[in-house]
Amino acid sequence: MAENGSSGFFSGLLVGGAIGALAGVLFAPKAGKETRDGIVSESDEILNKAKSELEKLRTELGDLKDKVTSTMSGKSTTTKPSDTAEERDFEESVSSMDESAPAKKTKKTK
């Protein structure tokens, strides 16, 4: 969730910066050509900053993915054996839904 807040902040920062730069250039007392050149240079600057932030975000997400992958690879995905006949029947019926062939009923003894 913190990632969503920080990416929203950076998006707002970039959009706000773009609007502020555009307003500043448009209201500055310059000739038309100078104003257009200023808009182009400001937009290039903002685009470069946005690309830089995007690359930084990609790197952070890649690092997060690596951490999650390494954490999950260390976890066991096996479950404990069923204790009762009802639990075993339920698990067999669920597995038969997952597979196209019906599951074989086997009796387990303790």
Image (spheres, helix red, strand yellow):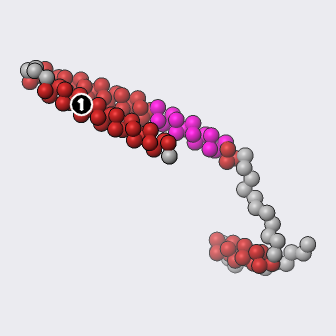
Residue 76 covered by magenta stretch: no
Residue 14 sits in quarter: top left
Against 75, residue 67 (above or below) is above
Residue 105 sits in quarter: bottom right
For the point 44% across and 32% down, the residue is 55
Q: Residue furthest right?
A: 110
| 41 to the left or right of 109 | left
| 1 to the left or right of 50 | right
For the point 52% across and 39% down, the residue is 61
* Towards the viewer: 55 or 84: 84
Residue 60 covered by magenta stretch: yes
Against 50, residue 78 (above or below) is below
Question: What secondary structure is the magenta-colored segment mainly?
Answer: helix
What percent of the width, then of the height, locates residue 33? 11, 22
Amino acid tagged 1 = Gly
First to last magenta residue range: 56-70
* Towards the viewer: 13 or 97: 13
For the point 72% across and 76% down, the residue is 90
Q: Is residue 36 visible?
A: no
- The residue pinned by badge 1 equals 20
Against 24, residue 107 (above or below) is below
